[in-house]
Amino acid sequence: MIFNMRTSLWRWIGCGTLLSLLQAAPGGAAEPLAPLQTLRGLAAEGDARAQFSLGTALEHGEGVRKSPQEARDWYCRAAAQGQVDAWRSLGWMYANGRGVPRNDDIARYWLEKAAASGDEQAVNVLGMIGGERTYENGCSHIATLPWLAERCADPDCKAIVGVVEKLSREHGLEANLVLSVIRVESGFDVRAQSPKGACGLMQLVPATAVRFAVEDIWDPEQNIRGGMAYLRWLLAFFKGDLVKALAGYNAGEHRVLQYRGVPPFRETRNYVRQIIEDYGRSHHPYDVSWLNSGAASAPELFAGREVRLPESRDREF
């Protein structure tokens, strides 16, 4: 199964336009002038066809330096919009270990989607690989939330998304979850500050910043890194129960333990509900090794962002 950028672009923008924009560089290689720039621009704007074609170019090094991991990321974005070709390409990459670690489970995830849509090539490849059904698809570090296009359209907000995607790979957290937390915590305002002293995008308090080695609480990347470190610690502590982890992020893990679930605080219940609705899931994969970082050295570090008294004892989340 070989894809070619020129073929993809030919179908997409027309042969006349393509021939007028592509030119040969010394040595016979295609030089990425306007076509690639145009493609990148459209892909960044969310055009799924452009995202798939850009992924194809990057996977095979047609007119651009080969970059399988970047290709995978663009395929992931196109796949999230239902591009069957991207489903098949992701399956092929993981089945063959093309620039990504070979993983038959992930390959099967994508190839089954493509095969179910009637893609014959995917059907044929499925018959040649093993693998089992999994929820892991190799794209969890890519932001695909439908509300991002509307609520995060300016360059500064898009830069935040880029940082979250980069750090998601390091921390093993899904980008969509982290962005849902940021949306509720700060509305993507890097200078947000609560009356109780929580600061920045992920509303860290100084104690949590110290706990997770954040030197500058107002630096956006450090703030996100610290918030993600705390969130993944909570996920390991509560064994992937996202409802409890989010409640702990808002009110402190000691409160979750005290009430054996989401504390009866209106703010905390609303906070958890909003993020779960944004993110769409109530469980997240976790690793027990995450508990090795951020262990509290004093009881007060478990106090959350503020000491609260129950506002009501009506129904739990």
Image (spheres, helix red, strand yellow):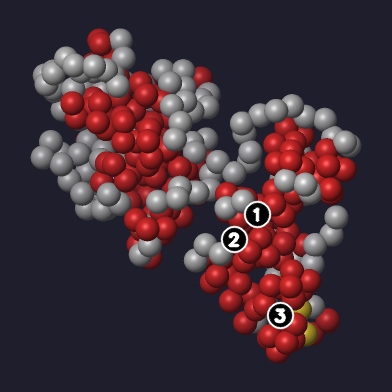
- Residue at the extreme bottom of the image, as rendered: 20
How far apart are the alpha carbons under marks 2 and 1? 7 Å
Q: Tell me which amino acid carries mark 3.
A: Gly
**Mark 2, other Cα within 10 Å: few <14 / some 14–19 / many ≥20:** many
Q: Quadrant of residue 43?
A: bottom right
**Mark 3, other Cα within 10 Å: few <14 / some 14–19 / many ≥20:** few
Residue at the image position 54 percent from the left and 72 percent from the top: 41
**Mark 1, other Cα within 10 Å: few <14 / some 14–19 / many ≥20:** some
How far apart are the alpha carbons under marks 1 and 3? 20 Å
Residue at the image position 47 percent from the left and 43 percent from the top: 175
Quadrant (top left, top right, bottom left, bottom right) of the N terminus: bottom right
Whether pointer 2 and pointer 3 mark residues with C-beta atoms closer than 8 Å, the reply is no
Whether pointer 2 and pointer 1 mark residues with C-beta atoms closer than 8 Å, the reply is yes
Q: Nearer the viewer, residue 83 or 200?
A: 83
Quadrant (top left, top right, bottom left, bottom right) of the C terminus: top left
Q: Earlier in the sequence, mark 1 or mark 3?
A: 3
